[in-house]
Image (tube, rainbow, N blue to C red):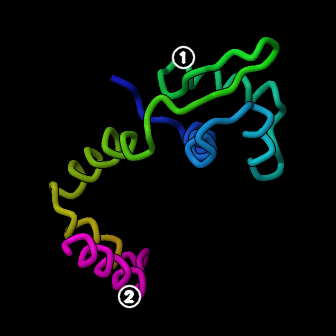
Amino acid sequence: MKRRLSEKEESLMQIVWDRKHAFAKEVREALPDPKPHINTVATMMRRLADKGFLTIEDFGSTYRYLPAMTKKEYTNLFVKPLLAGLFGNSIKNAVTFFAEEEEISAAELKEILKMIEKKRK
């Protein structure tokens, strides 16, 4: 089974998910300052491929990376079990926790309700 990605790895994957595919140089350019060296980005991209999160297209002297799984698949694989373990399979418990910790606003809760109602229609 694949292991959950580190925060840095997830930030690289987010860029590739958003772009659908990317060269290491493009990923580096999309990162916030201070940017890591291009060799660091390329090494991390290669490791993500080795872990099965990216696939590689060889363009001779450079490589283009594509996601091997969608962001939704990643979320289902790692986030849902985490929430299930922490909140007893209850989304209500998760939302209550964030509301009590003031991590979610009333406006955000209303937006979530609208999304749920829209999906039910």
Q: Residues within 10 Å of mark 2 (few under 14, many from 20)?
A: few
Q: Are marks 2 and 1 in contact (CB under 8 Å)?
A: no
Viewer-side residue, 86 vs 32: 32
Residue assigned mark 1 = 50
What is the span of residues highlighted in magenta in the rendered image? 101-121
User: Residue at 27% of width from left, 53% of height from top?
Assistant: 83
On-image quarter of the C terminus: bottom left
Viewer-side residue, 53 vs 39: 53
Q: Is residue 100 visible?
A: no
Image disc number at residue 23: none
Image disc number at residue 106: 2
Point out residue 33 in the picture as x, y percentages from the top left corner: 82, 51
Q: Is residue 107 magenta?
A: yes
Instruction: Give the residue type that dot 2 points to.
Output: Ala
Image quarter of residue 27 = top right
Viewer-side residue, 20 vs 7: 20
Q: Is residue 26 magenta?
A: no
Q: Is residue 94 left or right of residue 55?
A: left
User: Residue at 58% of width from left, 37% of height from top?
Assistant: 9
User: Residue at 21% of width from left, 67% of height from top?
Assistant: 93
On-image quarter of the N terminus: top left
| Number of residue marks | 2
Instruction: Give the residue type that dot 1 points to.
Output: Asp
Q: Earlier in the sequence, mark 2 or mark 1?
A: 1
Point out residue 42 in the picture as x, y percentages from the top left corner: 73, 25
Say which element carries label 1. helix
Q: Is residue 39 visible?
A: yes
Image quarter of residue 91 = bottom left
Image quarter of residue 65 = top right
Residue 90 drawn above or below residue 82: below
Residue 94 drawn above or below residue 10: below
